[in-house]
Image: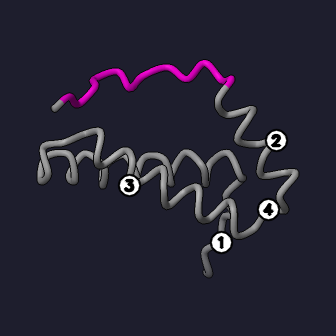
Amino acid sequence: MMKEKKFMTDAEIIHQLNTEIYQQATLHNEKYKDSILVATAYLAVATKILRSIMDEDNFRMFMDHLSEENIPPFRKPTLH
């Protein structure tokens, strides 16, 4: 009997990616001992990806929306 392949929802994919990326970021924080530099590097990569796929107006609207968001910190922050 062949197992049926389960397709992930967008929410499940985002959750999985967030978990994996957070684990990688934690390792980078431990290696470089500077959470600000690690976060800045991740933010730069994310910004470049978004800038590559969005037109100017949508990119600006997204960045404006992001800057207005109230984003909670991780439960256990890694400080340098």
Compared to 6, does 14 lie above or below?
Answer: above
Q: Which mark is residue 41?
A: 3
Amino acid identity at mark 1: Lys
> Of marks 2 and 1, which one's residue comes earlier in the chain?
1
The quadrant of the picture occupied by the N terminus is bottom right
Amino acid identity at mark 3: Ala
Q: Which residue is mark 1?
A: 5
* Residue segment shown in magenta: 68-79
Q: Main secondary structure of the magenta part?
A: loop
Q: Which mark is residue 54?
A: 4
Model colouring: one colour
> Of marks 2 and 3, which one's residue comes earlier in the chain?
3
> Of marks 1 and 3, which one's residue comes earlier in the chain?
1
Secondary structure of the residue carrying numbered label 4: loop
Instruction: Give 13 or 70, whichever is nearer the viewer.
Output: 70
Amino acid identity at mark 4: Met
Secondary structure of the residue carrying numbered label 1: loop
Between the residue at mark 4 and the residue at mark 1, the CA separation in whole angstroms equals 32 Å
Q: Residue at 65% of width from left, 71% of height from top?
A: 5
x, y (%) of residue 30? 13, 46
What count of labels does the image hold? 4
Q: Label 1 neighbourhood size at 10 Å, few (<14), some (14-19), many (20+)?
A: few
